[in-house]
Image (cartoon, rainbow, N blue to C red):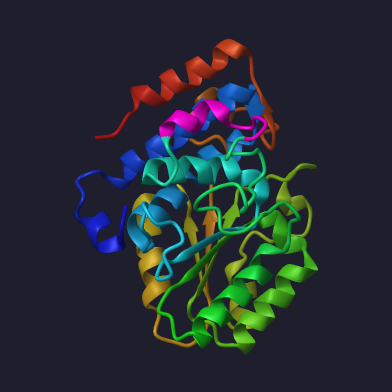
């Protein structure tokens, strides 16, 4: 998609975009037989809203200077972002079968040097927001009108470096920075709420000086409204959208699993998952 105005004119619904993102993610996970598919299924609605409603970019020119930047702090969510890039036409479908393979442009953890549209190398959690702050400040100094979107996880809210970046963004009045927190209440060792997070995160961000919203991250209508408010907020302050998502959204037999941080399923279950998704294909 070249830009937001053309994206809005398309007759392809956001629900259809989110469905396609989930399907691409399942196809890639099937290649390896395992992966961080729970996160990809959960965050598909957020990515659909980001790429097909909110952001300016050119699919045929991923490094276009006027683009909005999407920084994925959580490198293990790469499968989700690849799925969005596939749906956007930035990556070609014929590379799906290379996912996670040697020399693939789609390694299991996101690397900017390999993948068109992958703006930063993630993986060391807690670093992405700091990088986004630097990028947003740089764009300000170039008098650019572009936005920086930074997706981070609820687990990263326990990292001290995240809160240093939170304070820095306020100090520099970075109204071109929109943080997106995927709050799925799942970390490698258990529920995020059993670690350092709190049930309502928005008041904490507001206390630091951010314009903060907290929404159902699987409700496309709520997401569109939240992204519009974040982009159009008039005050000179950074913005955050805390998105409460459901791991494995859309695949009931995976949703019911107790542990969904990293998923392995039987070989025949990938086809079962895709078939279940196809039953609810939106228009």
Residue, x 45% and y 46% (percent of image)? 85
Q: 62 or 51: which is nearer to us?
A: 62
- Name the side, left or right, on which 256 lies relative to 68: right
**Residue 86's quadrant in the figure?**
top left
Q: Position of residue 82 (x, y in %)?
A: 51, 42
Q: Position of residue 46 (x, y in %)?
A: 46, 52
Query: Can you say whether 194 is above or below 165 in the image?
Result: above
Query: Can you say whether 193 is above or below 55 in the image?
Result: above
Can you name the residue that lies furthest to the front here?
Answer: 103
Q: Position of residue 77 (x, y in %)?
A: 61, 45
Q: Position of residue 271 (x, y in %)?
A: 49, 16
Residue, x 31% and y 57% (percent of image)? 2
What's the magenta region?
Answer: 93-103
Q: 152 or 201: which is nearer to us?
A: 152
Residue, x 72% and y 51% (percent of image)? 123
- Name the side, left or right, on which 79 lies relative to 3: right
């Amino acid at each position: 998609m070249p830009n937001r105005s053309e994206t809005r004119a398309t007759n392809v619904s956001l629900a259809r975009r989110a469905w396609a993102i989930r399907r691409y993610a399942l196809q890639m996970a099937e290649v390896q037989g395992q992966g961080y598919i729970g996160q990809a299924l959960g965050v598909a609605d957020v990515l659909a809203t980001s790429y097909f409603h909110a952001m300016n970019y050119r699919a045929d020119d991923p490094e276009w200077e006027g683009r909005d930047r999407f920084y994925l702090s959580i490198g293990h969510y790469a499968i989700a972002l690849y799925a969005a890039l596939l749906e956007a036409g930035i990556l070609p479908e014929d590379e799906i079968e290379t996912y996670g393979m040697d020399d693939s442009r789609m390694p299991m953890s996101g690397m900017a040097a390999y993948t068109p549209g992958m703006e930063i190398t993630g993986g060391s959690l807690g670093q992405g927001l700091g990088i986004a702050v630097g990028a947003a400040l740089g764009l300000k100094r170039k008098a650019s009108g572009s936005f920086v979107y930074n997706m981070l996880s609820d687990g990263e809210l326990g990292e001290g470096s995240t809160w240093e970046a939170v304070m820095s963004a306020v100090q520099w009045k970075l109204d071109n920075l929109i943080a997106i927190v995927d709050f799925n209440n799942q970390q490698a060792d258990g529920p995020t709420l059993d670690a350092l997070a709190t049930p309502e995160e928005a008041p904490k961000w507001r206390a630091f000086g951010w314009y903060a919203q907290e929404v159902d991250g699987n409700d496309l209508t709520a997401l569109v409204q939240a992204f519009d408010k974040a982009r159009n907020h008039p005050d000179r302050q950074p913005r955050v959208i805390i998105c409460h998502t459901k791991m494995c959204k859309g695949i009931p037999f995976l949703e019911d699993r107790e542990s969904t941080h990293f998923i392995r399923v039987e070989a025949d279950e990938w086809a079962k998952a895709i078939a279940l998704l196809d039953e609810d294909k939106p228009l």
